[in-house]
Amino acid sequence: MTESFATVLRRLRRRVAILVVLAAGVLIYGAVGYRGLSGGRSSWVDCLYMTVITITTIGFSEVVAGAEAPAARLFTVTLAFLGVGVFTYAMSSITFFITDAELRAHWRKRRMEQALRDWKDHYIIGGGGPIAPQIAAELRATGRRYVVVAPPTDTALRPSSAEADVAGTVEGDPSDEERLRVAGIERAAGFFAAAGDDTLNIVACLTARQARPDVRIVAAVSDPRNAAKMRRAGADAVVDATTIGALRMASEMVRPAVVSFLDTMLRGRDPVLRVEELTPSARHAGSPLGTLMEQVGTDAVLLAVRHGGEWVFNPPRDRALAAGDTLILMTTPDALHRLTESFG
């Protein structure tokens, strides 16, 4: 069984305490011994100096009176052996500190949590359910930062060192408000309740909603009967894997070419194409859509505009933007980023 970090830290502290006591004991033993062998003729500083050069095997000239006597040389031999023993114990303690997996994991976690303090507009994936890796993969593919909040046993979602700029982890229960705050729920763009258990997802939704009342929450549900409970718990949208799977199967049957096109778009990597949404800021109200689309050229295709509860498909380029309009585009992450910087 893996030791807890607190247990490993206690072992380390005990080793350091023993090392300090042993080192102090050897220094006192050597200084007092040389002082006695010199008959009090050598100063305490000289005796301590002689002790240090002996136990460190530096081997400078002897500065203690009577150090050439047989009794003094035998004492020096015993002191040297004691020094080697303390040095060996010190090296084993240092090796323990460097190689212990629990300690290294703790420091890695501390560095990650400190880095997350500067993140904003990222997404939080709560739980390590079967859909969580796919959510993480999609966020990575579209250049969006995310943090996974899951127990330490869920290692499949742990990002590699190459992904540290876009992906982070916080070990713990996604229904624990303190863990969500470490993940930056106050600055996040959204929260995914993606555990494999509906009850845990309901509690995670409640916790996230209390910690951040205005955050968008998307929750997974295994049993369709729990969808209403998930919404009452604070979820803005609930995804039922059974329903999604049924729609996919029907589409594969009646519109296979469309499904093939969407699969190619979602799985392609050169370029990465997605259907995205953009809400221009109020200062662009009244501007024609053509002005916006000229910013990205052929890197984006405008599919529709949502105005209030109405949809306008394939809108004309001379249509004026209205405050609150949401644009639906097929575009690349880079083009969307340029559009967001210019108009979002």
Image (cartoon, rainbow, N blue to C red):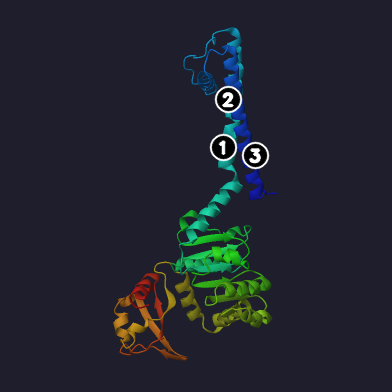
- Reading the chain from its start, which is encountered first: label 1 or label 3? 3
Amino acid type at mark 3: Arg
Residue that appears at 45% across and 73% down: 265
- Secondary structure under tag 2 reads helix
Residue 23, image x and y in percent?
59, 29
- Of marks 2 and 3, the one in the foreground: 2
Q: Where is mark 2, residue-wise?
A: 27
- Of marks 1 and 3, the one in the foreground: 3
Q: Nearer the viewer, residue 49 or 298?
A: 49
Q: Is residue 243 left or right of residue 331?
A: right
- Reading the chain from its start, which is encountered first: label 1 or label 2? 2
- Reading the chain from its start, which is encountered first: label 2 or label 3? 3
Q: Is residue 337 left or right of residue 79?
A: left
Residue extending furthest toward the top: 69
Residue that appears at 60% across and 70% down: 194
Q: Quadrant of the C terminus?
A: bottom left
Give the label on residue 14, or none.
3
Residue 25, image x and y in percent?
62, 27
Callout 1 crowding tier (Cα within 10 Å): few <14, some 14–19, many ≥20: some
Give the label on residue 94, or none.
1
Amino acid type at mark 2: Leu
Residue 242, image x and y in percent?
63, 78
